[in-house]
Image (cartoon, helix red, strand yellow):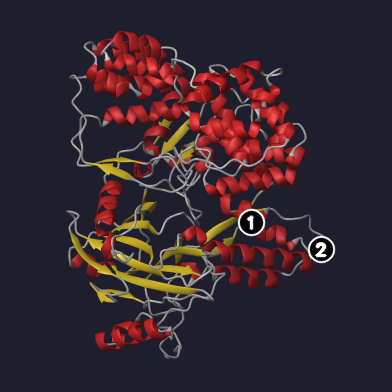
Amino acid sequence: MNALYLRRRSKVTLPEGTGATPLNVIAALQKNLEALGFLLAEDVVEGLKRMSPTQVDAFYQRLVKDLRAMVGAHRPFRPMYPNFPAQIMQMSEAELYFNAIRHYWTLALPGAEAGEREPLEDAPRLRLIRLGTREDFESVFTLLARSKSPFSPQDQGDVKWFVAQYRDGIKRLLPEQIPCKENLALLGAELIRNTCDADAVLGAHVKTATDVLRLAVAMSGGDVSLAEACKFGKFRRAARALLLGWVERAESRTEDMLRWKPRWVRLGERLHPGEYAGRFPQTAAAFDVLRNDRPFESFNARVEKGLRHKDAAAVLELLDARPGELARRLDHLARTSADAGAVVARFAKRAEHVSTPVLLQVLTHFRHRDEPTALRAFFPKGSVAKVYATRRSLPPLPVGVAAELSAVCERALLDRFSKLPPLGKCYLDGRLKSYLVPFSQRSASKSLRTLVRGSRLPLPDCTTLRFFVWWKNGKSRVDIDLSAAMYDADYGYVSTLAYYNLKDFGAHHSGDIVDAPQGAAEFIDIDTAKCRDRKVRYVVMCLNSFTQQPYCDLPECFAGWMAREKPNSGEVFEPKTVVDKVDVASDTKMCLPAVFDIANREVVWADIALSGDPRFANNVRNNLSGVSLMLRALTQLRKTDLHTLFALHVRARGEQVSAVESADSVFSIDRGVTPFDLDRIAAEFM
């Protein structure tokens, strides 16, 4: 319980005290936690004082285990050169080359002894651990279930934990609405596995045939976004009847099923709808249309037919019944219709029925619609985080139409938010403009801090950025390469720090290890001042599986970065200096955890994968075109930011004030509602 609570809220719960523990014992406990970068709040300390020494020891042992895993200190870090970075600085190119070749031939590491290192001189800001309550802990599940954004893999794991632990008791924590269909499927699969009467709980939420398809995919361990086909497992008779019964109650079942025809044909082979034709005749008829190609004109077919014939009026009449689809096709309709004003007017009448996430995205799209841009970036659905970018610009809209459509979205959102509980006096931090709204986190990696891709975080005060990666062999030898690609302000390629170039631009690589039977680590130090002096603006952190195994096949692989002032003081890996750590477990062989904007002293949260296989060796050099494109896409994103979202809420149901001390509601990067409260944002503000 505390491991989940600590990761999501930086809080812990304490058992009822049965004794007393001296303050000096708790002080020693606190000192050990400081080495990991954490500090106990005063309320936690007071609670520990009321517990017996045995209770405190049990709490401490579990807490340290969880914290070490959070920052990566649960694994030993042994770089090729143990006295990194000074050792690399002092060695000649010939020595580095000879040691690398010998390692490639024999897998032997250089025989250098680890010298005595100076104590750590850095004093990073510690993360505060506060005392929580059982009710606050349980609210984590309720917020996740209310989320309007698809679950991340970490969210999925936490939801599974809650349902497996609470079983039938989870019903009291379920919200009235489960708005995200992907989340409904994942949650529903767990309810079917762990509770007695899933139909009573889920029946009101499962409304369409696609809901049933997602649920069947979730029960088979597939991708509920439906971006990838799923191999369906076997379903028990009771589960088959449950799924077919929900299809029978759904409206427009045949049309929904035709959208995913091959998937439904495969699922029908598992559900055997013919056996239940007497109980569910409409479902059996729908399967007959799919299997035997019976004539059926779908809604989308009628819309596409109207678009081909340029009959905008007919298309608008059709889309009137489906406001969400109207919103998604607005740009196409507005630029192809002979009467763009009619499109705006129709949308104005139906905007109140469009979901908040769609309205926000449409608002942002049209606000920036007429601005010149070099790239348009897209994040496709799926379990692997990819970005597609194109240079093609959209055809122009009639003058003023983009502004009118964005105004319609804004009015609809303000009207909707005004019906929510009042916020009182609100403080709105301008720095929130650098953080994006969590529309979709389905492919976000598990990390020490989770943010939305493209968000920009301030760099801590430091002279050196130290990247790190740790991995362990799977079924065969695994070689993961840590690299840093450098670009100037115009995205021109400057240099690369990698296994084939260990020293350049004030940066140093700890050496290339190509085998990790017991685990291996690599580091890169980036001297930010020297990079600025030599006109390097962007440094892209890159991970490449040189031996071509996807990261999902490895027992463990994680990466991150530290902020260091005195890089030769302390150990090479100092847990308290870790700023971010990301678990790398996606089905890809190349990923970019982060981009560092040296000029603006910002970190651009990336957490994206590169698709495709390089023509030759899988290293950063052979992927530079993809790295360059992803760099441009991430740094030129035009997505809805949190300042825009919260500003709408403040206008609709609050009063903005300039002093945080006088505010009833605070929206900031480090207090109140922050960019790291993704579950709360997705549940309460979207």
Q: How many marks?
A: 2
Q: Tell us which disc is closer to us: 1 or 2.
A: 1
Looking at the image, is 585 positioned above or below residue 472? above
Question: Taking 14 as reference, is 476 left or right?
Answer: left
Looking at the image, is 346 positioned above or below residue 678? above
The residue located at (35%, 12%) in the rendering is: 316
Question: Taking 515 as reference, is 366 left or right?
Answer: left
Let me know if residue 184 appears in the view: no
Q: Nearer the viewer, residue 181 or 405?
A: 181
Quarter-wise, where is residue 122 in the image? bottom left
Residue 535 drawn at (x, y percent): 18, 63
The residue located at (71%, 18%) in the rendering is: 279
Residue 40 drawn at (x, y percent): 60, 61
Identify the disc placed on residue 281: none
Residue position for label 2: 19
Earlier sequence position, callout 1 versus callout 2: 1
Let me know if residue 255 appears in the view: yes
Residue 164 drawn at (x, y percent): 71, 46
Residue 682 drawn at (x, y percent): 50, 36
